[in-house]
Image: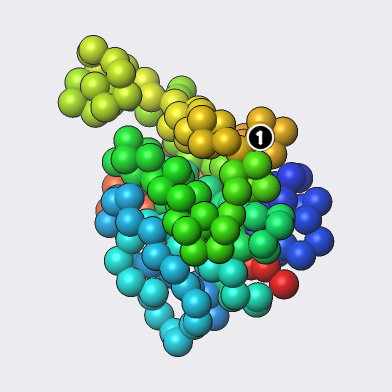
Amino acid sequence: MTLRSSLLSQLPWVEHGFGTRNDALSQDGMAGLEQVHSSAVLVADRFEGGRAGTGDALITNRSGLAVSVRTADCFPILLADVRNHAVAAVHAGWRGTAARIVVEALGRMRDQFGTSPEDVYAAIGPGIGVCCYEVGGEVARQFGLDQPGNIDLAGHNRRQLLEAGVRETHIDTLSGCTFCDAARFHSFRREKESAGRMISFIRAH
């Protein structure tokens, strides 16, 4: 079944969902991206079919236009600006998290739509948990560790949202580790090249 954030579900003008292995949402009719594990944020102002470009976050204030990302261990993050009715879909793996892509998305929403962080509701969807995300020294150093260890990507993104000015009560982190729970989630680390992808989306009405 599609997972929903209890926080975003409180907003009557928002439609959203986090896809799972058992509910393979389609990006047909949605704006998507050629994802490259970057900090690039694109604006989707119309949908002409296919992908909006190369990057890892999409923002829009166009009513009825869904923005979406694909994940299989990386974290999907959905943002909604309750004042300006702008939304964003963010793809945050370790590279994007280290590059603070969720903060970049907030900044681009501010520049494009006048978004203020205190007006933003954020939902961090399922990704690989700290229980299973062991990394080598090079990646660990990106997150302040001096030796190989386990990284809490959801926690890092949550802290970045807080530091950017999003209120603690406006951040929802969904439970579930994509590596642990093979029955519900695809995992690139577990399944390698055969891993499927899960679609997460948000749309304002």
Q: Is residue 118 visible?
A: yes
Percent of width and height locating residue 140: 27, 23
Quadrant in the picture for the C terminus:
bottom right
Percent of width and height locating residue 201: 57, 62
Relative to 49, say whether 157 is above or below: above
- Quarter of the image holding residue 149? top left
Side of 7 where 118 appears, left or right: left
Relative to 41, say whether 158 is above or below: above
Quadrant in the picture for the N terminus:
bottom right
Please identify the residue farthest to the left as the structure is shown. 138
Read off the residue under disc 1: 167
Q: Residue 61 versus residue 125: which sits nearer the camera?
A: 61
- Residue, x 45% and y 45% (percent of image)? 102
Percent of width and height locating residue 49: 44, 84
Q: Residue 113 versus residue 197: which sits nearer the camera?
A: 113
- Residue, x 30% and y 18% (percent of image)? 144
Side of 158 where 93 appears, left or right: left
Q: Residue 87 versus residue 126: which sits nearer the camera?
A: 87
Q: Is residue 200 visible?
A: no
Q: Amino acid at mark 1?
A: Arg
Percent of width and height locating residue 139: 24, 28
Quick one: label 1, few (<14), some, or many (20+) residues within 10 Å? Answer: some
- Residue, x 55% and y 63% (percent of image)? 113
